[in-house]
Image (spheres, rainbow, N blue to C red):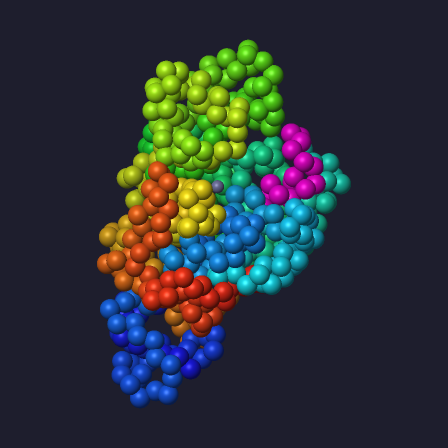
């Protein structure tokens, strides 16, 4: 038996904070008792004085599936207090299709899960089955509708992943090859969710100019599959679309009022982060061979430079995230080199179209409004990074989402509601068994943290140092991380298969 005493309990339900002691029996929470119990108990006492004790945080939107095989500790998330990651978002779930990269091999999600468990991850992982991974496995990057035989193969892969415990079906409809799919294809695939408690999670076809049509498509798919809908990183991208937020929120509220279960996740930053090639307007955005196309001729290059002036993105304000230029804007680098922003962007895409960049396009006011919605949970939209590796650099959301989200929401709605959006809300959306609450019978995934000191200092210039303020993280009743022994990570996580109901 263990007992955590002295802490203020924030149980994840959104209810009031209270004083009490939490008794653990093995990997579960046994009971919550009045202060004073630990003085008499025959148990290992964990001192939580001055701290908030919360359920371990759940990252509703992660991309760490393959990274966790190379670096199972996943310290970037653990040190924020995260104990479970929902992976496989935005249509990308390598775990759900046959895989062999020389180092790691699996045939199915069950095989991936066994492999991950054998590597003893620092925190729990679960996954959605991603449409892009399934479509690419069956029909590559083909820009066409699937044949009946291909559709049958895609359905078989999705069905197998769901049977192996995938939490639902995810799409990333701005990426290859998902952007080539029609709503008919997506409805047919999502129909496998019918009658289950699994979720359709979508990075919508547009988050800006065609946001309302994209939302209508997402609602139509979830409605015809009679399943729960999770809108990934909900936003209104590009200043000219910021005014759309009231209409978008009203549309979601109307669907909820009509009985649909609609939720969303959001990271608390106004820069997004994706491939630099996403700066390209049509028709170049649909060109899988863009790198070769640019290398082919100077005319092609000039054409793309001209096209970049029609980009929906603020190209000059875009921050480069890789190479020696990381942390700098395209505008600054272009000025320094005496070339146009379009020319520089084209050259960088020609060198490496998949390199990551941070795009400025979101409104701070809208972000805060979105975060306040009771159905919006925290999601980093990031892979775990290696804190001690200066070359493993990314968007500050990788290291800072949870502290920044906590403070932004707590400022508006109080700490209990902030914690609910980081715990029981995502646990309900993704149907995660016995997690997200401090409640007898629930798994003892817990975080002890100091709200005053809980902070991230990560930025866009390459500073990905560890967040502060977390004193202790427990996974299944065992110490996963303790600030007094910061170099040790106890690896007690595992793959969580999600039941159908
Ligand atoms: Zn996404």
Does any portion of residue 222 appear in the rendered image? no
| 301 magenta-colored | no
Q: Residue at x 44, y 21 (%)?
A: 344
Q: Which segment is the magenta one?
A: 130-144
Compared to residue 11, the image places residue 256 above or below, namely above
Location of residue 192 in the rendering, given as x and y in whole percent from the top left corner: 63, 51
Residue 311 vs residue 15, the one in the foreground:
311
Give the main secondary structure of the magenta stretch.
Answer: helix
Q: Work out whether residue 57 or residue 478 is closer to the camera in this orientation and state it.
A: 478
Residue 66 at x, y percent in the picture: 56, 50
Q: Is residue 209 above or below residue 474?
A: above
Left or right of 455 in this view: 397:
right
Residue at the location (26% across, 72% down)?
A: 49
Left or right: residue 205 compared with residue 454: right
Along the viewing direction, whichever of 45 and 404 lies nearer the viewer: 45
- Would you place residue 227 above or below residue 351 in this image? below
Residue 341 x, y percent position in the rendering: 40, 20
Picture quarter with the N terminus: bottom left
Quadrant (top left/top right/bottom left/bottom right) for the C terminus: bottom right
User: Horizontally, is 297 left or right of 449 in the view?
Assistant: right
Residue drawn at (34%, 79%), measured in percent from left and top? 45
Q: Position of residue 153 (x, y in %)?
A: 72, 45
């Amino acid at each position: 038996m263990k007992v955590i005493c002295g802490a203020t309990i924030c149980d994840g339900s959104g209810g009031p904070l209270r004083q009490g002691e939490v008794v653990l029996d093995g990997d579960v929470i046994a009971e919550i008792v009045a202060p004073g119990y630990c003085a008499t108990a025959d148990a290992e006492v964990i001192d939580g004085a001055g701290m908030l004790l919360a359920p371990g945080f759940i990252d509703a939107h992660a991309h760490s599936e393959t990274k966790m095989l190379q670096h199972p500790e996943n310290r970037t998330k653990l040190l924020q207090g995260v104990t479970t990651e929902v992976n496989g978002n935005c249509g990308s779930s390598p775990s759900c299709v046959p895989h062999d990269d020389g180092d790691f091999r699996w045939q199915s999600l069950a095989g991936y899960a066994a492999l991950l468990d054998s590597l003893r991850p620092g925190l729990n992982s679960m996954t959605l089955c991603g449409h892009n991974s399934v479509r690419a496995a069956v029909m590559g990057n083909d820009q066409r509708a699937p044949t009946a035989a291909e559709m049958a193969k895609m359905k078989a892969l999705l069905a197998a992943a769901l049977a192996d415990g995938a939490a639902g079906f995810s799409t990333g409809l701005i990426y290859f090859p998902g952007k080539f799919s029609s709503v008919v294809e997506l409805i047919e695939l999502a129909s496998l969710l019918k009658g289950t408690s699994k979720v359709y999670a979508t990075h919508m076809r547009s988050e800006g100019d065609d946001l309302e049509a994209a939302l209508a498509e997402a609602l139509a798919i979830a409605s015809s599959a009679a399943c729960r809908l999770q809108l990934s990183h909900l936003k209104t991208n590009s200043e000219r679309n910021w005014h759309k937020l009231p209409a978008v929120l009203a549309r979601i509220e109307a669907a909820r009022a009509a009985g649909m279960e609609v939720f969303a996740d959001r990271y608390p930053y106004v820069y997004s982060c994706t491939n630099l090639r996403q700066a390209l307007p049509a028709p170049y955005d649909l060109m899988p061979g863009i790198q070769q196309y640019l290398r082919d001729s100077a005319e092609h290059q000039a054409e793309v430079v001209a096209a970049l002036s029609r980009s929906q993105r603020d190209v000059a304000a875009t921050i480069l995230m890789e190479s020696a230029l990381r942390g700098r804007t395209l505008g600054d680098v272009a000025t320094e080199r005496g070339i146009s922003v379009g020319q520089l962007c084209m050259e960088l895409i020609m060198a490496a179209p998949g390199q990551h960049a941070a795009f400025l396009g979101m409104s701070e006011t809208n972000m805060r409004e979105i975060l306040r919605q009771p159905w919006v949970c925290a999601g980093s939209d990031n892979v775990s990074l290696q804190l001690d590796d200066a070359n493993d650099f990314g968007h500050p959301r990788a290291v800072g989402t949870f502290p920044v989200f906590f403070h932004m929401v707590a400022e508006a709605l109080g700490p209990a509601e902030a914690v609910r959006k980081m715990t029981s809300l995502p646990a309900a959306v993704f149907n995660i068994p016995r997690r997200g609450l401090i409640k007898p019978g629930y798994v003892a995934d817990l975080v002890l943290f100091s709200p005053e000191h809980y902070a991230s200092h990560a930025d866009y210039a390459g500073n990905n140092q560890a967040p502060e303020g977390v004193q202790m993280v427990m996974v299944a009743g065992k110490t996963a991380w303790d600030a007094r022994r910061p170099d040790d990570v106890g690896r007690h996580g595992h793959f969580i298969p999600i039941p159908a109901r």
